[in-house]
Image: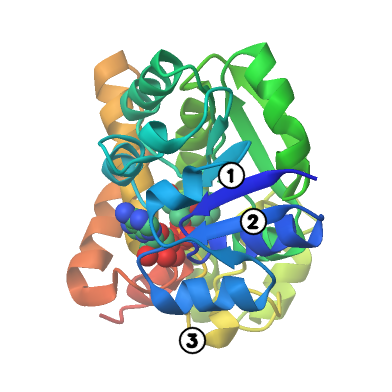
Amino acid sequence: MANIGFIGLGNMGGPMASNLVKAGHAVKVFDLSADAVAKAVEAGASKAASVGAAASDVEFVVTVLPAGKHVLGVYDGPDGVIAHAKPGTVLIDSSTIDVDSARKAAELARAAGLGVVDAPISGGTAGAAAGTLTFMVGGSEADFASAQPILAGMGSNIIHAGDSGAGQAAKICNNMVLGVSMIAVSEAFMLAKRLGLDAQKLFEVSSKASGQCWALTSYCPVPGPVPTSPANRDYQPGFAVDMMLKDLKLAQQASAASGATTPMGALAESLYALYSNGGNGGMDFSAIVKMLDGEK
Ligand code: NAD
């Protein structure tokens, strides 16, 4: 059993914190949203009054925040995690952020005598609730080994991707595949509709044929074939359009900076930007099927 501070209790962080409680850890939580904190307390966590309080007298601090600026904002400064964590505390950041911010966060933590890993996640809110997330981890061997038992309370696949920032690199590559494949799967369902092919039949065929992929079989963008997918609850997230857009932008920035060629990723970014600009940033990202069907 460990003492854990947990900051960021949104769609992913909320269920992840609950699973740490279920695994027998003592979890102190902080979020800007009082509702999110109340839910975590109901699940057995204790409430911390500030970021600093969540990071004090614990062995681990887990953060699940929107973007790099939030993570650096919470880590740095007199009221931040780094100023309050005791030496030897291991910081686990499971947000999806840019590689440079992840490396900067790691430098700040190490300079203060703390352990640190970037450990972004894949598996969606269903994976967060079931404790079956995949973690891709960047950091030293020693910090990876320290973080592993905590990550095991929230996920079932834990992969050491390399040094600090390598987890984030793996994450943006993975999510570029997801953004592109969700659009491809959505296009196929809209074509099937116009050809008079039943959505369930396309699902039955493609999930057993070469079109099989996670966007289809775990997160189907049309209602019916996968009962747990957001399509069955009016596309409430889940994983919001603006979160996907953020990840696709991170991939394109990294692509431009490294000289990689990623035209499908660039097109996916443009299509998600278009959908977000239509006022849909808060919808689940699978709702892009509606834009492809001609809806605003
Ligand atoms: P979310 O918007 O639901 O949750 C973010 C939480 O952080 C909110 O509760 C917010 O109040 C809190 N927060 C923001 N700034 C804060 C601060 N300064 N101090 C304390 N709390 C603060 O987002 P989410 O969907 O849970 O995603 C979180 C991260 O996980 C993102 O980086 C996202 O890209 C990544 N991710 C999400 C999914 C998914 O399916 N939702 C999947 C994989 C990865």
Question: In this picture, is 30 found above or below 141?
Answer: below
Do the residues bearing badges 2 and 1 touch, measured as CB atoms within 8 Å?
no
Specify whether residue 263 is in view: no
Q: Which residue is mark 1?
A: 121
- Front residue of 206/169: it is 169
> Which residue: 39% across, 51% down?
51
Q: Is the C terminus in the top left, top right, bottom left or bottom right quadrant?
A: bottom left
Q: Is the N terminus in the top left, top right, bottom left or bottom right quadrant?
A: top right
Q: Judging from the image, what secondary structure is the residue with disc 1 in?
A: strand
Amino acid type for the residue under numbered disc 1 = Ile
Report which quarter residue 183 is drawn in.
bottom left
Residue 234 circle label:
3
Question: In this picture, is 203 found above or below 4?
Answer: below
Specify whether residue 279 is in view: yes
Structural distance between the alpha carbons of marks 3 and 2: 33 Å
Q: Which residue is mark 2?
A: 27
How does the figure colour the protein chain or chains? rainbow
Question: In this picture, is 242 found above or below 122?
Answer: below
Q: Earlier in the sequence, mark 3 or mark 1?
A: 1
Q: Please provide percent x and percent y for residue 132.
A: 76, 53
Asked if the residue at label 1 sits under 8 Å from ligand 1, the reply is: yes
